[in-house]
Image (cartoon, rainbow, N blue to C red):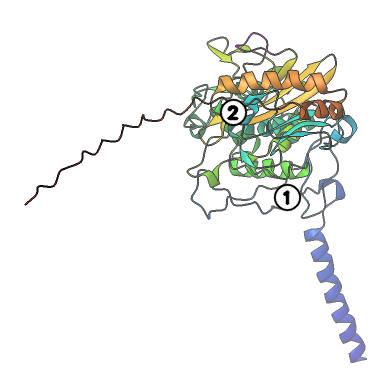
Amino acid sequence: MKLKYIILTIGLIVLAHLIILFVCFYQPADSKTSNVPEKEEKLVSGKQAGQTPAAAAVQPMQNANPAPAPGVAAVQPVSESRNRQYPPFNYQTAWKGVIPDLPASAGTRAGILVDADTGNVLWDKQATTPVQIASMTKLMTLLLACEDVQSGRNGITLQSPVKVSSAAMKIGGSQVWLDPKETFPLEDLLKAVAIKSANDAAYQVAEFLGQGDVYGFVGRMNRRAREIGMKNTHFRNPHGLPGKTSAEDNVSSPADMALLAEYCLNHDKLMQWAAMPKADFRGGKTELVNHNNLLPGRKYPAPGVDGLKTGFINRSGYCVTVTCIRDGKRMIAVVTGFDSGKNRDLFTRSLLNWGYARRDDPAAANLKTAQIKPKPVSRPARKTAAKKPAAKKTATKKKRK
């Protein structure tokens, strides 16, 4: 009998412990949120090499899909799937390298021209090679902001008030001179990023969307790049300013930037800002002037250009990602590495004309282009120094002894 009571007592103790554990750790299904931190790659910009910023927690999204399984990053929704709107890139009919019709193509380090409607790549000059992208970085910052607004992530809207931080005020380069005394609607800061390419505004947007953790936001930029298929891209900051060394610069390839541009095309507000030659800021006290001189009303307007983003640091040269639509046909061009903004813009304008002329039958156009013989380079005749006449030898008479 004693053994029976002992077993019963042990069973009751075990049951009590199970009930206590259940009460402590059980959560209803509708209250579960994913807060699993993700490992981020080491970011060097603004920190010494070897330091790893705190990993950002995966935030639950309002009006979105259920939370992912533990350890799986949440994928931000896109307004329209790229696979439904734009086909994959097809390099079969791409003209590679320098274009005989466009000698200025020799001045670009790497570039691409894509017919977005068909996926045909019309021009490929080291299109998958990673290069410094400078302020073209801001396209990813803008894309994430638009996706956050669209999904209502953390209750964010375009009218969400954003108080300027002292850290944002210290960011140099192209800027709108933010002051910690100021507070702006998120939309105003995004316009400053898209139109003026303001580095301080880009940093402030990243800080706001990252809930104070800029490096966590940069981690999101890199995750989003991987999710949409950008294979040769790595971001170290949200604005594109150079690091202390080239290893600390933001890099991408022309093909990756063209892919990113396609995602940007899905957001009407982003494209609306990018197409504005000028806009008011601070209620008209500051004017935002677009750096994209291919837009209507700018220095070198090109028909149909409606975006997207320029860039320049010393190590990147002058670069640009351009979106263009003519007669309902969409093209995307990316060029990098030019020695001046003027040469970049004039070449890009010519490149778009060249691309639209061969769009309907690029294979036949390639055959015709292949028949173009490069003009021989005329070099001035080398001047040779006139030979001096050899001195005449005079016979000397030997004296007879």
Q: Earlier in the sequence, mark 2 or mark 1?
A: 1
Tell me, for residue 35, which label it has, or none. 1
Does the magenta portion include 339?
no
Give the vertical position of 17 relative to 70 (above or below): below
* x and y percentages locating residue 47 in the rendered image: 50, 47
Res 186 visible: no
Element under label 2? strand
Q: Residue at x 70, y 27 (%)?
A: 100
Most extreme residue toward the front is 400
Categorize mark 1 by other alpha carbons within 10 Å: few (<14), some (14-19), many (20+).
some
**Residue denoted by label 2:** 311
Categorize mark 2 by other alpha carbons within 10 Å: few (<14), some (14-19), many (20+).
many
Quadrant of res 395: top left
Give the main secondary structure, helix, strand or loop, of the magenta stretch.
loop
Amino acid under disc 2: Gly
- Label 2 close to label 1 by CB (< 8 Å): no
> Looking at the image, which is closer to me, 347 or 232?
347
Please give the range of residues in magenta. Answer: 296-302
Give the vertical position of 69 relative to 282 (above or below): below
* x and y percentages locating residue 131 in the rendered image: 62, 40
Q: Residue at x 72, y 53 (%)?
A: 36
> Looking at the image, which is closer to me, 169 or 300?
300
Res 382 visible: yes
Amino acid under disc 1: Asn
Cα–Cα span, label 2 and label 1: 36 Å
Element under label 1? loop
* x and y percentages locating residue 258 in the rendered image: 74, 32
Quadrant for the N terminus, please: bottom right
